[in-house]
């Protein structure tokens, strides 16, 4: 597990790896930290949305934000600065299927629960699982 810190070392390392300028590297580092944090987040988010709320896969890419339906198995294409990143939805899960990364890059594998995320940082494509709770906070109210 990498340490989820926004340390300058991380920014510099990414910058050197990819030859990005400083602003790009900072963005990339921020995305990476967000992805890691979301993956490693404690369960406080998962508890509220798995109880029947609607779940969406949300993909952030340079061309915008797209919501993917969970129940439809498909492969989607997202354009980034390096090329096309493929996002696969299957059996209620989603993952980054393929991406034109210059280096082998950790994409996080399958995600299916709210709060989880996967990302191809070099191509600036971030896949998130979001839940829209049905209006009630299941944590706060017990019936
Ligand atoms: Zn990648």
Image: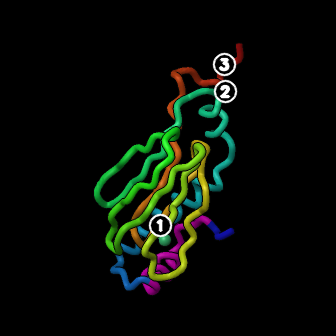
Q: Is mark 1 within 8 Å of ligand 1?
A: yes
Horizontal side, residue 34 vs residue 143: left or right: left
Residues 10 and 86: in front is 86
Q: Which residue is mark 2?
A: 139
Q: Position of residue 93 (x, y in %)?
A: 58, 48
**Where is mark 3, residue-wise?**
141
Local secondary structure at mark 3: loop
Q: Residue furthest front?
A: 73
Whether residue 124 appears in magenta in the rendering, the answer is no
| Residue 6 magenta | yes
Q: Residues within 10 Å of mark 2 (few under 14, many from 20)?
A: few
Q: Nearer the viewer, mark 1 or mark 2?
A: 1
Check if mark 2's residue and mark 3's residue have beta carbons within 8 Å: yes
Q: Residue furthest left?
A: 63
Residue 50, placed above or below residue 42? above
Part of the protein shown in magenta: 4-17
| Quadrant of the image containing the N terminus | bottom right
Is 23 positioned to the left or the right of 131 in the image? left
Q: Which residue is mark 1?
A: 120
- Callout 1: SS: strand
Q: CA distance from mark 1 to mark 2?
A: 33 Å
Upstream in the sequence, badge 1 or badge 2? 1
């Amino acid at each position: 597990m990498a340490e989820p810190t926004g340390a300058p070392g991380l920014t510099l390392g990414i910058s050197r790896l990819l030859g990005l300028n400083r602003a790009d590297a900072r963005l990339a580092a921020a995305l990476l930290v967000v992805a890691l944090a979301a993956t490693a987040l404690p369960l406080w988010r998962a508890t509220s949305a798995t109880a029947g709320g609607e779940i969406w896969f949300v993909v952030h890419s340079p061309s915008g934000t797209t919501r993917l339906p969970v129940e439809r198995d498909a492969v989607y294409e997202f354009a980034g600065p390096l090329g096309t990143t493929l996002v696969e939805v299957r059996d209620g899960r989603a993952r980054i299927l393929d991406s034109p990364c210059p280096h082998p890059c950790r994409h996080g594998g399958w995600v299916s629960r709210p709060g989880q995320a996967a990302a191809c940082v070099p191509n600036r494509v971030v896949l998130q699982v979001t839940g829209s709770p049905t209006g009630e906070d299941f944590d706060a109210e017990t019936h």
